[in-house]
Image (tube, rainbow, N blue to C red):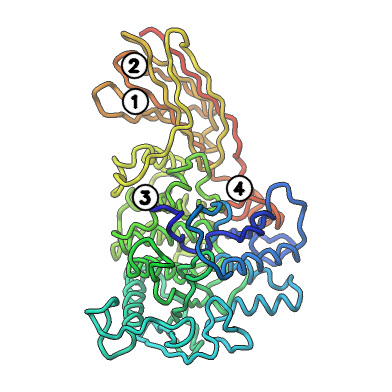
Amino acid sequence: MTSLRRAPVRGLLALVLAALTAGLMVVSLVGAPAQAAPDRPAGAPAPATAPGDDDLTNEQVAEQALETVEAAIAPGEPDTAAQPDPAAHQEFTSALRDLSSLQDYLSPAKQKVAQRLLARPTDPVSTCSDSDYACFGSAPVQKLCNALICVHYTKTGPHRVPGDNNGPGGSWNGTAGGAPDYVEFTLATMTTVAKRYVNAGYRPVVSDEGADGTAQTDIYVADIGGGAFPLYGYCWTNDAENAHVTVAPYCVLDNDYKSSQFPTHTPQGNLRVTAAHEFFHAVQFAYDFYEDAWFFESTATWAEDIFYDTVNDNRQYLPYGPLGRPAKSLDLWSGLTPYASWIFMQFLGQRFPASQGDMPVIIREIWEKLSHTGTGAESMYSVQAISSALEARGTDLTTEFAKFTAWNRRPRSFYAEGAAYRPAGLSSSYRISPSDTAKRVRFSLDHLSARHYRFTSDFRGSKRLEIKVNLNDREAGGFAYVLFKPRGEGARLRVIPLNAAGNATVTYPFGSSVDWIEVDAVNASARYTACDTAPADERPYYTCGGRPVDDRMAQAITVRAVNP
């Protein structure tokens, strides 16, 4: 598994130390068609502060958003000695979205700074200066285009592309004597990615109708990997609105992906997976610019492996989500959790493998349901749309999320590449013995999470294990199953049939003939209140920016060894 200490992570990795010390972190999560709170722009994201902070004014939150972007692009060397705090991680596209939505609350002087940071790399020097993370300034800009994509680049200054131009035999597969090989490789890669999304039935990227001189989607290559926390790439728009609308994007990729800045994978591999990830953001903008941020990132991270299966960059995130932290909510917008949640998209794609253009149809259908206009539009938020897509397939979110948690305990048995995944961990393990014949485990579960408990036998001879569960009621997403491992045989999965109140009692063989029994409790609740209307400084953030109804739900599992 890739070490996060030695590899930069796509997007905004962390804030600078001062921001961490102050607890400053700005995130975005919107997506409900509900009325926005009156004290912030309609549809604006709800940036976060550290737990325990006093209520912040909109002006203070806007300044934090500005500081977040500035921290991401601050010059410096990547910290390879210690892993940055994952709680401070954020994707740069989302950081820009926050700043754009909040810039009106800044002072006039700071609004100018924000406008400079939100500028295209080719904007005038008065707007975009040479000191910016992606600003060509006065350097001559050239472009290489086809019918879909235009790559903008410069041969001079800090953002210059590699000068190789020796064709297929060089570092980058290009054409000798044409544009620089790196530019040709970038154009070919982005074109392949764009065509594949269209072939899979996704909407074409919204045209910018000639911004920067071309109607094609604009891709800029600049040195964005040289900051304290290297950026692989990002996508943005000149048409940012605090609303559920479609917008025309442009994207920025690094100008060389050199190994000194991106030490994991080859430069070519890093460019490819970044193209798949970031161009999916461009495609997402054709559905809903302000959809739930966790779904933006989890689906884009999932797409990396669909397009370029051998790079496997997205595996580095798995310890931070449902596989590594099963008791965390799937839709939590914090740290690296949204990236790690790509494994749920992989689950959906394998469970419902009907495809178009070698991509599972179910993910595209969910994006259509999220949209407010166009084919399939139902103005839903992320978890609503997932539930709707599952119901159309004769199942429901509770059932499928429970299966997902079962897959995560035995990834080798289910996922196509599961042999490379570490199983979701146990919450606790207990030994049942003649001197300790019973155990009652009390715990809580947040929505869209699970806990796994193992019970092993210290008995000789035949026994049975009586299992009583008291969980969420079925309406609130309660679900439980047993993983039963007879000695010398494979594990067997059995659903525990809960009654309407979320309770059940079952018994299974135990004693010397059984290696262990696991009881797995699931909270698959998908109920939220205050969608898009929670206070601006409330955290953490989940689907629709709302408050989960069924978090911190008290649960209990009681086991007792009994005679057959």
What residue is disc 4 on? 528
| Mark toward the start of the polypeptide (1 vs 2) | 1
Up/down of 192 relative to 79, above or below: below
What residue is disc 3 on? 1
| Mark toward the start of the polypeptide (4 vs 1) | 1
Crowding near the residue tagged with mark 2, few <14, some 14–19, many ≥20 C-alpha atoms within 10 Å: many
Q: Amino acid at mark 3?
A: Met
| Mark toward the start of the polypeptide (2 vs 4) | 2
Up/down of 424 relative to 26, above or below: above
Crowding near the residue tagged with mark 3, few <14, some 14–19, many ≥20 C-alpha atoms within 10 Å: some
The residue drawn where x is 48% and y is 34% is 451
Residue at mark 3 to residue at mark 4: CA–CA distance: 35 Å
Element at label 4: strand
Residue at mark 1 to residue at mark 2: CA–CA distance: 9 Å
Residue at mark 2 to residue at mark 3: CA–CA distance: 37 Å
Q: Amino acid at mark 4?
A: Tyr
Q: Mark 3 or mark 4: which is in front?
A: 3
Residue 360 is at least partly visible in this image: yes
